[in-house]
Image: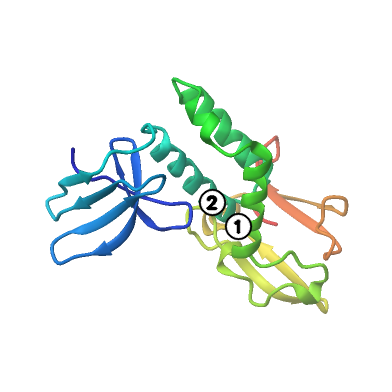
């Protein structure tokens, strides 16, 4: 069986072979030397992706290992890229894993829900700016994370002073084009759901979107 490489939870390259996982030890002229993460068994990989295993393992193989690493990597990426609550991100991933898995091994070997939530909360805090408690703490200019849509499209239209107060206007180019073609615009302001560092949040939409549609600018 050809060598299959995976990424560990710490971003390290590992060898996953026949249900056993190996960490990288050293690189030789025409090969790479690996050691099992759970015992002293070793493996050598070659440029043609062939694998030679030395010594017997002292534990059973775990076929779910690669799937677990993939789930954890996906969760870390989502915790940084998505703005949704960590609780929802983790619970959705665990529910999907439960539906797709033919056995209980996958969920059994994943960290408990509360531990995974804590791990992702720490990861998000490490990779995102801290939540500002005053308008003065709000970064200027805003990081790109908060200025683009999930498709990478520019979303921040304006960041500056309006009537002497820092104001932000968000909308995509497509939404602005759509609004420009509409005869009527509708806007509504709210104080209740407004972030605490701002005074008011104003949302706008068009006549086509006003009945249950999403806002086109904020």
Viewed as shown, does residue 33 lie left or right of 214? left
Above or below residue 71? Residue 202 is below
Q: Residue at x 82, y 76 (%)?
A: 163
For the residue pair 124 and 36, the one nearer the viewer reads as 36
Is residue 87 visible in the rendered image? The answer is: yes
The colouring scheme, among rainbow, by chain, secondary structure or one colour, is rainbow
Q: Residue at x 87, y 50 (%)?
A: 192
Residue 75 image position (x, y, % from top left): 53, 46
Disc 2/disc 1 C-alpha distance (Å): 7 Å
Question: For residue 140, what is the image quadrant?
Answer: bottom right
Viewed as shown, does residue 174 lie left or right of 6? right
In the image, which disc is placed on residue 123?
A: 1
Label pair 2/1, CB-CB below 8 angstroms: yes
Residue 141 image position (x, y, % from top left): 63, 76
Q: Residue at x 41, y 38 (%)?
A: 65
Could you say whether the residue bearing mark 1 is in a helix, strand or loop? helix
Total labels drawn: 2
Question: For residue 169, what is the image quadrant?
Answer: bottom right
For the residue pair 22 and 155, the one nearer the viewer reads as 22
For the residue pair 207 and 77, the one nearer the viewer reads as 77
Q: Residue at x 68, y 73 (%)?
A: 159
In the image, which disc is placed on residue 138?
A: none
Above or below residue 128? Residue 81 is above
Viewed as shown, does residue 172 lie left or right of 3? right
Residue 178 image position (x, y, % from top left): 56, 51
- Local packing at callout 2 (Cα closer than 10 Å; few below 14, some 14-19, many 20+) is some
Q: Write down the residue under mark 2.
A: 76
Q: Earlier in the sequence, mark 2 or mark 1?
A: 2
- Local packing at callout 1 (Cα closer than 10 Å; few below 14, some 14-19, many 20+) is some
Q: Quadrant of the C terminus?
A: bottom right
Q: Quadrant of the N terminus?
A: top left
């Amino acid at each position: 069986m050809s060598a299959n490489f995976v990424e560990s939870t710490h971003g390290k390259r590992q060898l996953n072979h026949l249900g056993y996982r190996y960490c990288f030890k050293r690189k030789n002229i025409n090969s790479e030397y690996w050691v099992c993460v759970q015992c002293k068994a070793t493996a050598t990989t070659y440029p043609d992706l062939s694998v030679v295993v030395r010594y017997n393992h002292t534990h059973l193989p775990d076929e779910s290992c690669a799937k677990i690493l993939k789930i954890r990597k996906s969760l870390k990426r989502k915790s940084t890229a998505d703005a949704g609550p960590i609780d929802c991100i983790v619970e959705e991933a665990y529910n999907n894993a439960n539906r797709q898995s033919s056995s209980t091994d996958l969920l059994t070997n994943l960290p408990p829900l509360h531990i995974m939530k804590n791990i992702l909360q720490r990861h998000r805090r490490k990779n995102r700016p801290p939540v500002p408690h005053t308008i003065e703490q709000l970064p200027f200019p805003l990081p790109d994370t908060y200025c683009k849509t999930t498709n990478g499209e520019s979303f921040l239209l304006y960041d500056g002073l309006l009537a002497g107060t820092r104001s932000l206007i968000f909308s995509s180019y497509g939404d602005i084009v759509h609004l420009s073609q509409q005869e009527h615009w509708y806007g509504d302001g709210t104080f209740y759901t407004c972030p605490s560092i701002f005074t008011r949040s104003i949302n706008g939409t068009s006549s086509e979107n006003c009945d249950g549609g999403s806002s086109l600018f904020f």
